[in-house]
Every structure is written in structure tokens, then in C-alpha cells.
Image (spheres, helix red, strand yellow):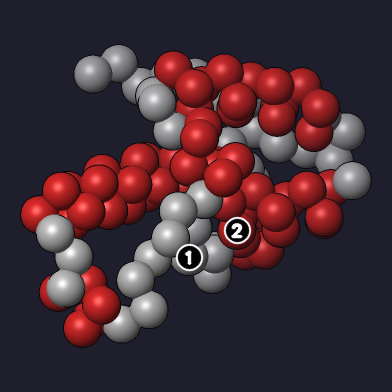
């Protein structure tokens, strides 16, 4: 797999950065999970009660989310990374970035 070149986010390029990240995440079939998020089961008992299809869908959503979060982490400098490093999901990281940059 070829690693795409990812533009680093700065204080002045959020608009261009977000357009490029949206295109990259779309090409990786991850944009939907960044934009919409996904529902994480409240506890282990809830997860155990899921059907096999629901478990498959949840596993795929988690995988897409981690892929998207990885790309977002790659697209920021160290100081910005510190702001989003505790984000549990790509949607949460995106929200933090939107608030801190704009």
C-alpha cells in the first residue's frame, strides 16, 4: 500500500487541509465515520447481545474510525497533536480541530 502524502495542518491552511483530508478519507472509505460517527455499545453486555451482523458492522466502523484517526494524526504537527491525542474517535478529533483552528 502506498502511503499518501498528507498536508500538515497549520494556523493558516485549515480550509485547504480540510478539503484534502476529506478527499483522502473519502478515498479510504472513512469520511462517513468522521462526519457522522458511529454508535459504540454502552457496555460489554450490550456488545455481547449484538447479532453477528451487528458485530461485523461495529467491527468495520471501528476499523474505519481508527484508519481515519491515524490519517488525521499524520496531518497535524506536534502541538496540534497534543490537542487531539486524547480523542477516542475521528469525529471527536475533527470537532476539536474545528473549534481550535477556526
At mark 1, the secondary structure is loop
7 is higher (above) or lower (below) than 95: above
Q: Residue 82 lies in what quarter of the image? A: bottom right
Q: Nearer the viewer, residue 39 or 71?
A: 39
Task: Kindly indicate whether the residue at mark 1 contacts the one at mark 2 (C-beta within 8 angstroms).
Answer: yes
Q: Position of residue 75 (x, y in %)?
A: 58, 37
User: Viewed as shown, does residue 35 lie left or right of 69?
Assistant: right
Q: Residue at x 40, y 26 (%)?
A: 29
Q: Residue at x 70, y 29 (%)?
A: 18
Q: Position of residue 8 (x, y in %)?
A: 65, 33
Tag shown at residue 92: 2
Res. 21 visible in picture: yes
Q: Residue at x 38, y 79 (%)?
A: 42
User: Viewed as shown, does residue 65 lie left or right of 25?
Assistant: left
Q: Position of residue 61 (x, y in %)?
A: 33, 47
User: Viewed as shown, does residue 101 lie left or right of 45?
Assistant: right
100 is higher (above) or lower (below) than 30: below
Q: Residue at x 82, y 55 (%)?
A: 99
Name the residue that disc number 1 marks: 88
Amino acid at each position: 500500500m502506498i502511503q499518501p502524502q498528507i498536508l500538515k495542518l497549520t494556523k493558516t491552511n485549515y480550509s485547504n487541509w480540510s478539503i484534502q483530508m476529506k478527499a483522502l478519507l473519502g478515498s479510504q472509505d472513512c469520511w462517513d465515520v468522521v462526519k457522522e460517527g458511529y454508535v459504540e455499545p454502552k457496555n460489554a453486555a450490550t456488545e455481547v447481545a449484538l447479532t453477528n451482523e451487528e458485530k461485523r458492522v461495529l467491527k468495520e466502523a471501528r476499523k474505519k474510525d481508527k484508519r481515519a484517526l491515524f490519517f488525521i494524526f499524520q496531518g497535524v504537527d506536534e502541538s496540534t497533536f497534543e490537542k487531539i491525542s486524547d480523542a477516542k474517535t475521528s469525529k471527536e478529533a475533527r470537532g476539536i480541530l474545528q473549534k481550535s483552528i477556526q
